[in-house]
Image (cartoon, coloured by chain):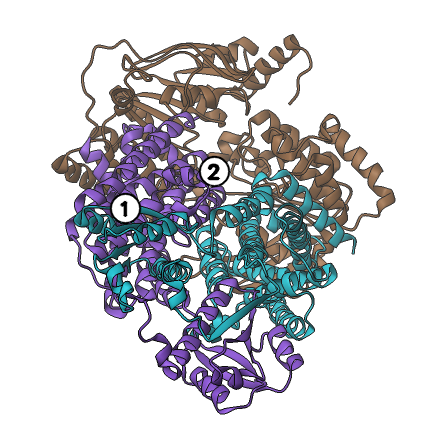
Amino acid sequence: MFRRIISLIKKEFILIWKDPRSRMLIFVPPILQLLIFAHAATMEVRNIDMAILDKSQTLQSRDLISEFKHSRWFRNVILVENENQAAKMVRTRKVQLALSINSDFAKKLMQNQPTSVQVILDGRQTNVASITNGYVSAIVAQYEAEHFPQRTQNVPRIKLEIRNWFNPNLIFLWYTAISLITILATSIALVLTALSIAREREMGTFDQLIVSPLSSFEILMGKTTAPLIISVILASLMGVFAMIFFKVPFIGSLPLYYFSMVIYLLSMLGIGLFISSICKTQQQAILGAFTFQMPAILLSGYISPVEDMPMFFQSLTWLNPVRFFLVIMKGICLKNMPAEYVYQNLIPLVFIAILTLSAASWMFKRNLD
Amino acid sequence: MRILKALIKKEFYQIIRDPSSILIAFVLPLILLIIYMYGVNLDSVRLNMGLKVDDPSQQVTTLIDSFKSNKFITPFVYDNPQKMYDDLTGSKLRGLVIIPNDFSSKLDRNEAATVQLITDGSEVNLANYAQNYTGTILAQWLNYSSKYSRKIPPSLISIEPRYWYNQDINSHYFILPGSLSVTMTLIGMLLTALVIAREWERGTMEALLTTKVTRIQLVLGKYIPYFILGMTSMGFCVFICIQVFQIPFRGSLWVLFVFSALFLFTAMGQGLLISTILKNQFTASQAALVVGFLPALMLSGLVFPITSMPIPLQWLSSIIPARYFVACMQSEFMAGTVPEIIIPNCIFLAIIGFLLFILVYSKTQMTLEGEN
Amino acid sequence: MGEGFSIEIKNLKKRFDDCEPAIDNLTLNIEKGKITGLIGPDGAGKTTLIRLIAGLLTPTEGEISTMGLNPTTQKDLINKKIGYMPQRFGLYEDLSVIENLNLYADLRGIPTDEKEAIFDKVLTMTDLKNFKERLAGALSGGMKQKLGLACTLLGTPELLLLDEPSVGVDPISRRELIKMVKSLATEGMTILWSTAYLDEAHSFDSCLVLNEGKIIFNGQPRDVSETTQDFEEKVIELMGGFNPKTSELAMKFELKEDNIEYVIEALDLVKKYGDFYAVKNNTFHIKKGEIFGLLGPNGAGKSTSFKMMCGLATPTEGTAKIMGQDILQNPSKARSYLGYMAQKFSLYGDLSVLQNLRFFAGVYGLNFFKRKEKIDEIVEILHFKKYLNQDAKELPLGYKQRLSLACAVMHNPPVLFLDEPTSGVDPVTRREFWHHIKALAKKGVTVMITTHFMDEAEFCDRISLFYQGEAIATGSPAELKAMVSPTATMADAFVGLIERKEAINGKVNR
């Protein structure tokens, strides 16, 4: 039996590897995408342009304005003459926010009286807007602390000491790189397996396989091994890239990492094979792989955490291998997650792998006709 | 003219009778919209946080209550610090707050009391949220606590933010319309890529090439039916957004129609170009994904702000049609028609679209040379 | 331009990439107003030649004149005057019969008011009037061909180019198709009909036989021979002849001893798709060393029967046994006894010859040493040495066939299943193939084969003729012929027995 499976695995490898175009397509796009998108996918907000309407025109207001000018988050600070100008700049997106300082700004401050500044934020991108608002608050608070230190002396106050474990500088790139490696390796594993059976059917070589002594189990085993190995190599390559170019640390256990990766990929391959076994043509297989991929990525916790989703979607994610593996990936790479927590996330993966591989096997047998 | 109509009719019959076209054009976009609406949340998210209180005094219970009643935090109170740290490492908590035993005594003495916040830095976004929430809760508790509030002077400069166009600060209002760029790219690229590959593989292209069909008719015969399909899908999605999900729309439907049409024209050009050059299904779909779909998701400004990207990527973004479409969509829905935004974006789209059209036209062969 | 020549070709050469030329220095003329047959095996260059004539490909060297026009520069003018039917009929499967007709009518510029009359004529001629609304994909193979032909004839072209219109279809449908073309062809229409079936040669006015891009024969078949057999002999002679040596393949074949009487058994096999019976109550027993043929028109159930026997389809009822092993109960063991050779080369084109051989050796359980030994043996016998590292898809057709056969017998199976193994193959290779098969059968290998070739049917020890899901006649070729008439040929027997059954059943859809 093993001899048969090994012959099949060798053949699958040769088929994928031989065509230089397909070789390239497997390795080059994911790595390219990793390099490009890791930089693009940032939730940080930089290079903000703002308009300021200074109705006060005093030393104090100009001090405040210079705080903004010197801040590393704001790029262009444009002074405007009136409200209409400010409004127009926001509306046409020349600036992301407009700040208005009242005419009695300095007077009130001198009298130790509270005053306010009005901030107009462009709500067309709320995530940018709220982060920007946060920056404005921080700068204003800093201004206040610097110029009126006595207000914060000798009063009860709370100082929040923040420590960011595992990623002290909160480097977004690390988060993105690790998530992207998962997503891109998944994509390749899925496509390779989804196409494998469909392509043999279209080429007419499938009958030869069925007619041979290979059992459906052996065929499926043979067809998963080559994509598995290729995906592991790809993920490792990308991992090395991330470590070199993005300086992503890896502090966890390497054996545990590879063990989890294999199980994760098996669950993915199971899904790919299932898709392949129900599709008659390559076109359908590609569409099927795609239709699964998109929601899986969106609902994996990459964009927003699973625990925040409505119950319906949360329960769906129990069948989404990406969700569990993302946790494991980040855990092992950045946190040296203790084994028991890794296992808690591995067990669902094992279940999914068994489920999908059996379903693929069953579907496969049914569709032999 | 007759020939063109016949080709379009033929394409329509094939679309209607092929379930995978319906899947891509209507089912998948609908699923995506539902996921964007209910499954993904870019606004404040609810976090699991650990809480350890070493200060036994009475006031601190009100602090614990304010953590518990905050709608963005699900607090878990721990006695065992090691377990708490493990749970943070094990991704069960997003952050921990530790209130030391001298917390209230320091406050009583008008000194600064420290509170420790440890976040899971591997989740950068959530760590930021944890910081914000904790800071806000602490500040509010202090300012409203009966014991301390009178001792604290109010801050001198307060900020009055107004979120224009989106008072609810609801991220769905911009994500959903913007997501249509991804959907339309899917339709424009994936569908056309697969359709042309199918034409070649079934051998019907050969027969067409020996009739009176001219090159322009061939090209238009591909553009037009899928353009109509795409616009229908777009209309369906817009309807769902506005009527079912209640996304506010303050602009003009005509303007929406115009720039959607321009964008679709461009997306189709991309798809047709890829499938005309790469006749193999695997390579065509990979190319469609790499060149069209992922950039539309990542580099269009839909989720990640373009201005925050490194400069080379910002240039790259300028050749991605989805970027212009997203800009128009977000603005049109929330701010109404802003000509200074709409017109330049439309011009770019038109230019890219026509360039692609010309490329597709020149690459369309009327012979079978190079098929093998 | 010579009088009466529709197509003139001089020193035509066509090369794809760096391969051997597909068309190698052809010079020929095709007469106007006649039906010329373009005959040759797969890969001979028939499709390439037709495409060159239509302007779908451009010549590497040489000149072509199609109806006085240059296909490279005046293709749009040519398009107005030709009808072209590609190999896969050029039909839109998702469109109905009438929608396909309408489409092609528009594409060929038929005035709207004339459409109705033309469609009527064509639909009656092709017997498709009752199927106007049916989707083209739901038609049977024969019907698709007729529809494809109908679409090509719209617009009454001057030149009709038909690329293998009769492919894969039984003799009855083939005869009908030729009849149809002859009657629909108006005065002065030139028809070029390409086919792989040598036995169609006598239906044409003139014949052009191609092999590997070169002309083997150009003229009227009647001039050289009276019957199809003689013509085939003549062609083989022209191709270099065939020297029957002892089949080394068979010699090296080691058949294990066994005591089984019936090597292949089918017991009440039934295959149902929903309510439709594809195969009904199929029972037969095949002895060791027999060559057993399955014959019948397309859709009759012979392929389905065949597939059930070798494990490609699951029977709805009944049992199939190989060497006494039930193929459903012990699939692995049963299948290890059989060798399979599919139609049209289903080995891995992207793998080299050696890689293919190694793969099949491994899959059929040959251990490492045996594998090497056997592969070396095969390479020696079938002269693969220089092709060892070439991709299988680039082999000349004859070698592809040999490779398929080699992979099928590598593990010394006592049973061989051959599914139309010689379709599309040149006559010399066909001879050689049957040479091997007969030698293997003599050694005790049992062979089950499906075929459309009447002469191959003659080689079988026994035949089962299928029609509408049932085996309507089983017996030796002589017995079947006798059932129809004392002087019947195999083809006559085929047609006669089926027409007899048709008459019994009443009018039937075809």
Q: Position of residue A97 (x, y in %)?
A: 54, 74
Q: Is any atom of residue C394 visible in this view?
A: no
* Amino acid type indicated by mark 1: Val
Which of the pair C107/B24 is nearer the observer?
A: B24
Which of the pair A86/B346 is nearer the observer?
A: A86
The residue under the point 64% across, 10% down is C505
Secondary element at image label 2 = helix
Which of the pair B231/C377 is nearer the observer?
A: B231
Give the chain of mark 2: C
* Numbered disc in front, either 2 or 1: 1
Q: Which chain is purple?
A: A
Q: Position of residue B14 (x, y in %)?
A: 64, 42
The quadrant holding residue C100 is top right
Residue situated furthest right in the rendering? C113
Residue C223, placed above or below residue B357: above
Give the chain of mark 1: B
Secondary element at image label 1 = strand
Q: Position of residue B3 (x, y in %)?
A: 75, 53
The residue that mark 2 highlights is: C234
Residue A141, placed above or below residue A60: above
Q: Please give left or right for residue B280 compared with residue B126 in the image.
A: right
The residue that mark 1 highlights is: B77
Chain C display color = brown
Tell me how far mark 2 sits from mark 1, CA to CA.
Answer: 97 Å
Chain B display color = cyan
